Image (cartoon, rainbow, N blue to C red):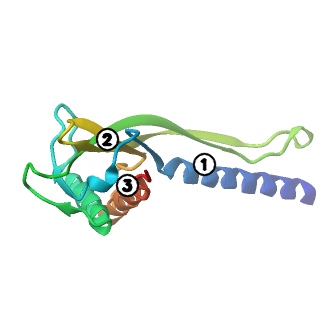
Amino acid sequence: MICRLKSRLAGLAYGVGLVLLTCGVMTAQDIKTNYMPGTNFSKYHTYKWVSINNTEQVDPIVAQQIKDAINSQLTSKGMTQVDSDTADMYVGTQTSIQQQQQWNAYGTGGGWRFGGGMASAQSSTIQIGTLVVDFYDPASKQLVWRGLATKTLNPSSNPQTNMNRINQAVAKLLKSFPPKS
């Protein structure tokens, strides 16, 4: 009886640990960046915000939080925001929020010797939010750098959590900006 109880408790602990591990992995942000080879990024000192047409829009509060996070990162790298068309670089963002099914499953073990265990599976819908940050060279009218952060715009009931998630994603995105020549 005690062996059976220990086995079930071990199985339960394993299942709970697996669920917690899965939840931790699911919330990690994925960051990808790419840039135009041969671009001289040392010539960019000023930037101007531009709109990218035909893109999904987030609410104005989130849009401002994204801009503030990017402004903070670019300022810390010695860049200056300007409103004139003579900026060295243009900055634009795109967002996408999609729904995805997530399955949370766990079992209490037991195995064949103890007559099986208990298992449970639950489905939920999660929001997968992607933030795209684009830098354009106004002289050549070309995209010179792009960064994507997925699992960034996942709405939470806590506004501070949302803002922290955006700040963290933008810091990760721009960590290696500008790229080394």
Label 3 sits on residue? 178
Label 1 sits on residue? 22
**Element at badge 2?**
strand
Q: Is residue 29 visible?
A: yes
Horizontal relation, residue 16 to residue 65: left or right: right
Q: Do the CB atoms of the residues marked 3 and 1 lie less than 8 Å apart? A: no
Spatial separation of the CA atoms under disc 3 and disc 2? 11 Å
For marks 1 and 2 on the same chain, the one whose residue lies earlier in the sequence: 1
Horizontal relation, residue 127 to residue 69: left or right: right
* Residue 138 image offset from top left, x and y in percent: 18, 42
Label 2 sits on residue? 144
Can you say whether 5 is above or below 52 in the image?
below
**Element at badge 1?**
helix
**Front one among 126 and 56:** 56
Can you say whether 145 is above or below 42 in the image?
above
* Residue 161 image offset from top left, x and y in percent: 37, 62
Residue at screen point 78% across, 43% down: 117
The quadrant of the picture occupied by the N terminus is: bottom right
**Front one among 100 and 89:** 89
